[in-house]
Amino acid sequence: MFDAQEDVRQDLAAVYRLIARFGMDDMIHTHVSARLPDEPDLLLINRYGDLFREVTPESLVVIDHDGHQARGAPVPVNTAGAVIHCCIHQARPDAACVVHTHTAAGVAVSCLAEGLLPLNQTALLFYDRIGYHTFEGIALDTAEQSRLVADLGDNRAMILRNHGLLTVGRTIGEAFSLMYNLEMACRMQLMAQGTGQTLHLPSADVCRRTAAQYDADPDGSADLEWQAMRRLAWLDA
């Protein structure tokens, strides 16, 4: 019998392992969360202290929108993770999954006044579709939540200034794919800027057209990609 909550646990644990596999983890820090099916006020998040490659479906923790553990024996839950993720899930009914990273490339781009540039096909996935949130210190204060939500708006991605990257997916696979591509766009930008040569940007018309092509997904690549990533996540488990 199909168990929707077990399926979500499997997918979310896969994202943690994929983030580690692709070098986007930060020791035991940063977080990925997913909404529990049929229980919209409850989320799954990692047990604080686990390496991302150690996360299993069973080790994920159930929390409510206030960041309090709702089930199971008490375990550590990262306060900043709860502050960031809970408000986004609460404000965005479409937010099935939220991914947050502190990669070197993502943080570097977050420190640039110009932010993410529309330099290439990968970056254009986010053209006119990304928010920016001003750094306020470590996200421990719930007063910051309203500003996080406002700065994200209805976008599926946000750059947290001087901090890192965040993506929001209608599915767990979409949230991971957005983060992978946002990370790659940041790495590509830094490599191009590192040459010291003049950068060539596509026209605004081409940028808008490419972003719309991504939205349409005519080949159904999003689902095919996630099925492949699920297989990769557990390949060596």
Image (cartoon, helix red, strand yellow):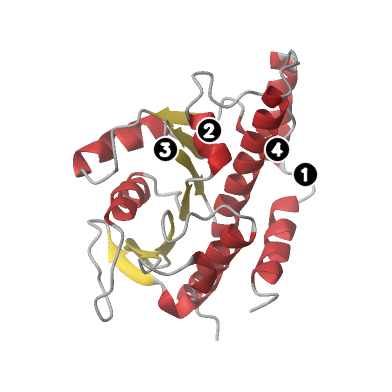
**Residue at the image point whose x is 46% and y is 74% from the top:** 5
- Identify which amino acid the numbered label 3 is placed on: His
Residue matched to label 1? 218
Q: In which quarter of the image is the N terminus?
A: bottom right
* Separation of marks 1 and 4 at Cα, in angstroms: 8 Å
- Identify which amino acid the numbered label 4 is placed on: Tyr
Give residue 225's quadrant in the image.
bottom right
Q: Nearer the viewer, mark 2 or mark 1?
A: 2
Give the image location of residue 190, x and y in percent: 65, 30
- Identify which amino acid the numbered label 2 is placed on: Ala
Does the rendering let one see residue 124?
no
53 sits to left or right of 28: right
Tell me the SS state at disc 2: helix
Does the rendering let one see residue 33?
yes
Q: Nearer the viewer, mark 4 or mark 3?
A: 3
In the image, 139 versus 95, the foreground residue is 139
Residue matched to label 2? 108
Tell me the SS state at disc 4: helix
User: Relative to 182, is 30 above or below?
Assistant: below
Give the image location of residue 230, x and y in percent: 66, 67
Residue matched to label 3? 163
Residue matched to label 4? 214
* Separation of marks 3 and 2 at Cα, in angstroms: 9 Å
Tell me the SS state at disc 1: loop
**Crowd band around label 1 with a 10 angstrom C-alpha radius: few (<14), some (14–19), many (20+):** few
Q: Which of marks 2 and 4 is in front?
A: 2
Label 1–label 4 contact, CB within 8 A? no
Give the image location of residue 32, x and y in percent: 45, 57
**Crowd band around label 2 with a 10 angstrom C-alpha radius: few (<14), some (14–19), many (20+):** some
